[in-house]
Structure formats: C-alpha cells, structure tokens
Amino acid sequence: MKITVLGVGTIGKVIIRDLLENWRVDEIIAIDYNYKELKKFVDSLGDPRVTPLKGDIRDIDSTAKQMEMGDYVVNATWYEFNIHAIKAMLKAKRDMIDLGGLYWMTKKELEWDEEVKKAGLTLLLGAGDDPGTSNVLARYGSNKLDEVREIHFRWGGRVVEEEEARVSFGFSVLTVMDEATMNAVMYIDGRYIEVPPLSHKELTYFPDPVGYQYTYTILHSELATIPWTIKGVKTVTYKDTWDESMFPILDFLKDVGLVKREPIDVMGQRVSPVKVLASLTKPWEPKSYYGVLKVVVKGVKNGVETKYTYYVGPVGYWEKWNAGATAVTTGLGATAGLKLLVDGHVGRKGVVPPELVDKPELWLRELSKRGINITEVKEEIRPV
C-alpha cells in the first residue's frame, strides 16, 4: 500500500512516523512546499520507503498527479487549502482524509458531498484529535444513551516546568490567530449562536498534571456537524485552555493589524500581515507541556439522567518522535481515521464527518494500541 501525505509540518511528521512504525506500507509520498526542510526530515528517518517531493497544493493538476502516486491521501496542509485538496482528489480519483476546517471551512467542504459521492469517493474530514477523536467519542457516548441532550468538548493543556512557560503554538499560527480573532459558535437549546472569541470563561477539571484550568470558547469544527449527525442533541459547546498572559499580545497584534488576511502594500509588494506573522512564528510546544481532550455526553438511559465523560490523555512530549502533545494526538487521530477508511469502516461515500464512521470503538482501539490512555467515567442522577 502507498500513502500520499500532503503537508509535512509538525503533524505531518507524526503521521509519517506512525505509518512507518505501525503500518505495512510500501511507500509514503511526502509532499511539501518547503522541499529543503522536507528533505532534511526524510533524510533523518533513514527509511527508503519515504519519497520526498516538492508540491504546491494550489496547483490542482500537479497535486492530482502526486495523489495518483498513492492509494490513499492524507491532507495535512493548512485548513484553508482543503477545497484545493478536494478538487485534486476528484481528479486523482483517490479517497482522502483531512484534519479539519475550523467550522466555516468544514461547512464549505460539506457542500462537496454530492460531487464526491457521485465520483464514488470518500473524504473523511476533520480526522485528527479535535476534531476527529472528539467527534468519535461524542458518537461512542451517544450510542450508550436512549436520549442525548448535551455534548461538551474541552481541551486542557498545561506547561509543568515554569522555566518553559513562554508563549508557544502547537500548530499553525495562522489557525491559532483565526481561533483567537473569529467569533466562536455555540449550539444552545437547538439553535446556533455566535459569541466573541475567548469568551464564556469556565473553570474545567482535567486529570493531573493538567488539573483545573480556565477554558474559553473558540471557533471549532465539531459544531459544524455534531448538531445534525447526533439525533436529539440540543446543546453543543467547545472550549479550550488559553494562557491569559497571551491576551494582551493578541490585543496588540489585532490593534496593529498583524492578524489581517487581506494583503497590504509594503514598499511596492502586496503581502498578507498574518502570513508574515506565521512565517516568523514557527509551531513549537515545550517538552513539559501536557494536553488532555475531554468529551462530556449527557442524556437519559433507562429513564435515568446519565452522563458519560471521556478523557484522552494526559499526553506529553514524545521523545522518540521529537513531537509535542498536540502533534501526537492530532497525528495519531489522523492515522486512526485513515485505518478505518482503508479497512472499509467508513460505510458511505461522499464527505463524511468522523462521528459517522461505522465502528467508533475501532478508532479508539487504534489510539490505545499506541499507548494513548482513554478513560470513561459514568455518572447517574437518581432521585433520593
């Protein structure tokens, strides 16, 4: 089997390492715009099964030809290129997974469902950690209830060593800036509402060493699908931990215009301020950073109010892969989703969110096999 991986950043590297160590692959076609860094990474692996290629996902025809080199495609590029990848997969006639679309891009991708279905193909979208494993846990918990009322997603993170506690980003700064500046979406009592980013502060429990952390609303992909894929749910929310020392920095970046997408004139050149910021600020996580995904599913079972809470992790730095917690959980979520796609456990064609895989327990099993701890807590509320 041959796998094409588009985008070899912090998460793409984890995906490739997992494919090499835990899959029977004949070849991995690794594609990135920054060929110099890509070649350096591939050389460090010392595995002849990895073929590095320079690529530009904006070139649909060229990308389609590169996709054709593999049997399946993993799109690990920045989420704004997801539609480019869909157009290329249709030309290449290859099934694909991607890592998510920050709500609004996910909505755009869903509009391609009929065309992808007509081509006899499957796109498993948002197949990472959150979205990805988060969606799967929402379905897994919902399947245990007779009636689902609420689903809440939380991500908690903490840097344990104080000397490492400085501003850092576990993935693309472009995505982080979007999360911090775009209005968030919540699904409350059966209707969507927009709220300011980093609002609705909440003290949330996570297992040690993360512990209690404040979480805040940010825009996220789960809200684009869960309200209509899980029958009966009336409330869906997503919140994430943020270091409050970052808030003044974010305010400054917004005030001076460094988070603007639209190109501006700089000495006769048209440049996007936020892309300059992203070019100067590379993804990085401290080695003492730990992260936990928490998913809460509330409803009724046998007439009793019941709540299932799931914890994925805590996950820390993986020395053997030189990868931080965010890259590890996202990358392994992606390969878990890919495994289900390859093994025929994504039963429908078209654009498919993770919660619609046929056997969510198989996704969780793939994570457990790689040492990712998943815990379930069941609580019942009975009258005295």
Image: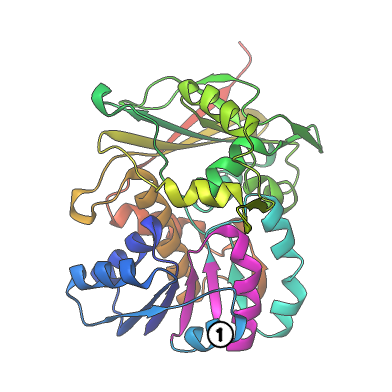
The residue indicated by pointer 1 is 64
Which corner quadrant of the image does residue 106 belong to? bottom right
Q: Residue furthest right?
A: 191
Asked if 298 appears above or below 61 in the picture, the reply is above
Q: Is residue 301 visible?
A: no
Residue shown at the point (39%, 47%) measured from the top left: 283
Asked if 358 appears above or below 188 in the picture, the reply is below
Asked if 370 appears above or below 315 in the picture, the reply is below
Please check the rendered image and state whether residue 79 is part of the magenta-colored stretch, yes or no.
Answer: yes
Q: Is residue 261 left or right of residue 135?
A: right
Which corner quadrant of the image does residue 21 belong to? bottom left
Asked if 284 appears above or below 199 in the picture, the reply is below
Residue shown at the point (52%, 50%) measured from the top left: 276
Q: Position of residue 7 (x, y in %)?
A: 44, 67
Q: Mark 1 belongs to which amino acid?
A: Ala
> Magenta segment range?
70-97
Q: Position of residue 59 (x, y in %)?
A: 59, 79
Q: Is residue 285 visible?
A: yes
Please check the rendered image and state whether residue 284 is part of the magenta-colored stretch, yes or no.
Answer: no
Question: SS for tag 1?
Answer: helix
Is 366 or 28 nearer to us in this picture? 28
Residue shown at the point (61%, 41%) measured from the top left: 259
Quadrant where the N terminus lies? bottom left
